Structure formats: structure tokens, C-alpha cells
Image (tube, coloured by chain):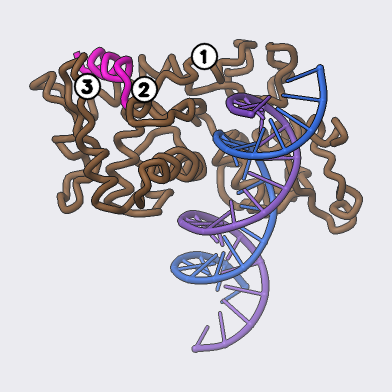
Chain colours: A brown, B blue, C purple
DNA sequence: AAAGATTTCAACCGCAGTCTT
DNA sequence: TAAGACTGCGGTTGAAATCTT
């Protein structure tokens, strides 16, 4: 592929797209900057107007998607944490493919990211177990992984009939007073340092390991100042991440240790 | 080192619901 | 009330990245 396609978003059909009046394909740094600037000044919504007034040859839908999934402040990028995995499994068992609804319960995560996570990780796991994600077999397996070395059993997900958002059985009984939301808050505020809530948004902005995003005032968020690609820092730390081949990889000892630390 | 296979995820598409005129 | 525009959602695609042989 022509390197320009990745670096500047010049699709092979660029000429046709320009003829049609709207661009498609990867967003460029300049487009991101224009959109972020516009939304910072005018707020979200009115996407078609935003696309026009910001000087973007994009559809309103494309602008909305880019903002919500990528440019919006506090979008968490990087690996899904253990607790997020737990929550996704539980919420999906209750709501099915209601990705936006599930995403609302995971601060900073987008429906697109959760959907991708589910399709690439969870469904893969189910496939390896040779059962459907909604089958009783899969749910039972998810509920009952046991790790003798850590002496902690973690029942996962699948409160199918309860009305509480969080199944109290979802976490090991380590702390009598620590609620799930408490621990989730702790995860977001401190543990999330491991997953970096404001990672550089795209690898094609990175050059030689340092971020090439222009440090001008057009970018309202602060991630690019770090100049470090944190994308792979915690690679493989949590459960499914890293393409594990078995339940041992789904719930490894380090996961249990980490969860335990979060709850102490 | 190279080729092929697999995985990942950003972005697009179509549809349905809501809003505006 | 009808029609068109806009918005949001879930499913799908395809190219880059990564892994395997």
C-alpha cells in the first residue's frame, strides 16, 4: 500500500471520494485536530453541521464515530482489565449484544471496543471450548475456574435473573466492606495507570517509539505529551489478553493476585 | 528471512428511532 | 400528519500488525 494511505489517509479512491464530496478511510492528524477543535468550541452533537463547519469532507456519522471512539476525552485505550472482563461477561449475559448499554457501565470504554473485544476474545474462547457463548456449558465454565495455587475461586459473570447491576457473587470474598464499585473506582484511578486511559490514539501517529502528534493547542487532551507508546506495556497481563489458548490463560495466577491487590 | 495464516480494531454500512419542518 | 434529516446502534469489513511455519 502507498505509505501515504496510512500516514495521510489518502485512500486509493481518494479522487473518487473527493469527487463525491466526502472522504472515507483512516482519519488524519489534521482532521482529528479540526474535529476536536470544533467540538471543544461548540460541543457534541449536530454532527453534520460539525462536519461542514469544521471544514471536514466527512459525513456527520463518520465525525460522530471518530469523536466517540477516539477523540473524546477520557476514552480508555489499551487492554481490557480483569474487572472489566468480569463486568462485560456479566452484563452480556443479561443484556446480550446491547453494546452501547454495556459500554455505559464501563467508564471510558466504547461500544465499539467492547464489541470487538467480545467478538475477538470471548467468542474465540467459546470456540476453543467448543460451545456457544450463551450455552450453559460456557457459562458454567466461566463461573467456576479454580486456582489452587492462589486459593481463590472466582465466580464469573452470569447473574441471569438478578436485578442488581453487579452480582455480589462476582468477586471473591476477600474484603467484607469493599464493594465492586469501590474497587472499580480504585482500578480506574490507580490501577488504570497500567492501561493508561489516555494512550496515544493510533499507532500510525507514532514514529520510532515516540509520538509524532503535533504539540499545538489544537489537541485538548494530554496523552501525546508523554511521547511513549504504552499500548503494549501491560500486554498479556490480564486474562484473555494475549490470545490465551486455555482457561489457564483466561484466569492466571497474576490476574488473581492483581485482583486481590485491588480489593485490599 | 520469507511467506502464509491469524488476529486485531478502526471505520463503514444499513436500519430504526427521533426530531424538525 | 407526512416527509425528510439527523442520530445512534449493532453487524460487518478490510488493512495492518502479529504470529507461525
Q: Is residue C20 above or below residue A46?
A: above
- Tell which circle, 2 or 3, labels the residue nearer the N-terminal end: 3
Q: Position of residue A257 (x, y in %)?
A: 27, 14
Q: Which comes before the other along the chain, label 2 or label 1?
A: 2
- For the residue pair B17 and A112, the one nearer the viewer reads as A112
Q: Is residue A8 above or below residue A89?
A: above
Q: Secondary structure beneath disc 3?
A: strand
Which secondary structure class fits the magenta region best? helix
Q: Which residue is mark 1?
A: A233
Residue at mark 1 shares a chain with residue at mark 3: yes
The residue sitting at 18% across, 19% down in the picture is: A148
Q: Quadrant of residue A42?
A: top right
Q: Chain of mark 3?
A: A
Say which element carries label 1: loop
Q: Earlier in the sequence, mark 1 or mark 3?
A: 3
Mark 2 = which residue? A188
- Residue B6 in the image: x percent, y percent? 58, 38
Q: Secondary structure at mark 2?
A: helix
Magenta residues, as a range? A251-264
Seen from the viewer's position, the closer of residues A171 and A99 is A171
CA gap, disc 1 to disc 3? 25 Å
Amino acid at each position: 500500500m502507498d505509505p501515504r494511505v496510512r500516514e495521510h489517509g489518502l485512500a486509493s479512491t481518494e479522487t473518487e471520494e473527493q469527487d463525491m464530496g466526502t472522504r472515507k478511510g483512516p482519519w488524519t492528524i489534521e482532521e482529528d485536530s479540526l474535529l476536536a477543535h470544533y467540538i471543544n468550541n461548540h460541543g457534541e452533537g449536530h454532527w453534520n453541521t460539525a462536519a461542514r463547519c469544521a471544514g471536514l469532507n466527512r459525513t456527520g456519522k463518520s465525525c460522530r464515530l471518530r469523536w466517540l471512539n477516539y477523540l473524546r476525552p477520557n476514552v480508555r485505550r489499551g487492554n481490557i482489565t480483569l474487572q472489566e472482563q468480569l463486568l462485560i461477561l456479566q452484563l452480556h449475559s443479561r443484556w446480550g449484544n446491547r453494546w452501547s448499554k454495556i459500554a455505559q457501565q464501563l467508564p471510558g470504554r466504547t461500544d465499539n471496543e467492547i464489541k470487538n473485544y467480545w467478538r475477538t476474545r470471548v467468542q474465540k474462547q467459546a470456540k476453543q471450548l467448543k460451545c456457544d457463548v450463551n450455552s450453559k456449558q460456557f457459562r458454567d465454565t466461566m463461573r467456576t475456574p479454580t486456582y489452587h495455587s492462589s486459593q481463590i475461586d472466582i465466580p464469573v459473570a452470569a447473574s441471569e435473573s438478578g436485578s442488581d447491576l453487579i452480582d455480589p457473587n462476582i468477586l471473591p470474598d476477600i474484603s467484607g466492606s469493599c464493594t465492586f464499585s469501590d474497587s472499580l473506582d480504585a482500578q480506574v484511578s490507580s490501577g488504570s495507570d497500567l492501561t493508561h486511559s489516555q494512550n496515544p490514539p493510533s499507532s500510525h501517529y507514532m514514529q520510532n517509539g515516540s509520538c509524532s502528534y503535533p504539540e499545538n493547542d489544537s489537541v485538548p487532551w494530554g496523552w501525546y505529551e508523554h511521547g511513549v507508546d504504552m499500548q503494549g506495556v501491560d500486554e498479556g497481563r490480564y486474562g484473555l489478553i494475549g490470545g490465551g489458548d486455555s482457561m489457564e490463560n483466561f484466569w492466571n495466577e497474576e490476574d488473581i493476585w492483581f485482583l486481590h491487590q485491588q480489593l485490599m
